[in-house]
Image: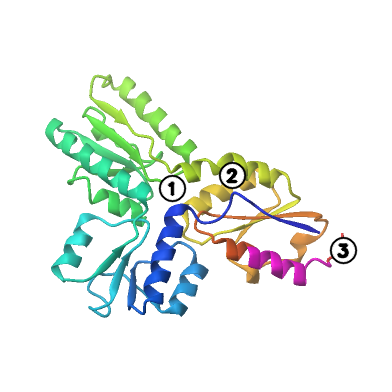
Amino acid sequence: MEILIDASAGCCPGVVKAIRKAEQAIGEGRPLLSLGQIVHNEREAERLQKQGMRTVLHVDEGDAAGYMLIRAHGEPPSTYAALDAGKRPYIDATCPVVLRLQRKVGEAALRMEKSGGYVLLFAKSGHPEATGLMGHTRGLGRIVSLEDLPMDTLHHPLEIFAQTTMDPEAYEAFLHRILQERDRLRAPSAELHIHRTICGFVANRKESLTRFASSVDLLLFLTGKESSNGKYLFSLALKANAAAHALGGPDELQPEWFRGVRRLGISGATSTPVWQMEELARVIREHYASIEF
């Protein structure tokens, strides 16, 4: 059985940056507290915790002398204010793409405050990036979805953004419906600015992952349970290859998956490190490669 690892897979630059900053702090012997799970990959978070990192949910938790890590998803301004008020030292590992988006959302909120409009965020409610972005909207933000159109805002000026890890096709469908409803309500004269802010690293993987998934007999897709981009990317893989399975690690492998498989592909979410895909390949070679066709 030939085993291939998707060359386009692996952690995105923002996640790589956060992990490196965490490893550097641990290596320097600093007490390190991650404000929320550092990455939506349970096994990677566990690896760092074994090295000494601790995960907390609030800025006032843990050793006050410990460094607080702001993860790649970013935080609202209120978090930084609380850290400063408590004189808590912190390491900011917010993804540069998210930082730029936060700045754009803040600038849009200032414009909407002056014109009586709203900032709409096409995002996953409760996702840490969405929470951080909402903190920059000056109270004018609304988290929206394709199923939850903000009808009461359509006669007002609008600036629309997307969380960086959302499905690009779903965002385009949402924008199409917004435009349709504005036309139906005869509100096209209201100011409207659309921003395409989905991360290019996520969006660009559509073609490469689809091509890779369709080239193998079986695709194994490694992802954390809470990874938004993992769910999106796996849905693409499944469309390209019905023999695709999402899993968190080698302990979830099923022997029956390998029957008749001559060409096996391994891929993962943008929060899945390469070492996990290499580990999965090694386990398959050791325990499943001998399964007869």
Which amino acid lies under the numbered mark 2 shown in the image of this protein?
Answer: Leu
- Tell me residue 61's x, y (percent): 26, 76
Determine which residue is flagged by label 1. 165
Position of 250 relative to 237 (above/below): below
Q: Which residues are magenta?
A: 278-290
Determine which residue is flagged by label 3. 292
- Residue drawn at point x = 22 percent, y = 43 percent: 106
Give the side of residue 128 with respect to residue 8, left or right: left
Q: Secondary structure at mark 2?
A: helix
- Tell me residue 266's x, y (percent): 66, 56
Q: CA distance from mark 3 to mark 2?
A: 29 Å
Which amino acid lies under the numbered mark 1 shown in the image of this protein?
Answer: Thr
Determine which residue is flagged by label 2. 236
Q: Are marks 3 and 1 in contact (CB under 8 Å)?
A: no
Which quadrant of the figure has residue 206? top right
Task: Pick whichever of labels 3 and 1 is earlier in the sequence.
Answer: 1
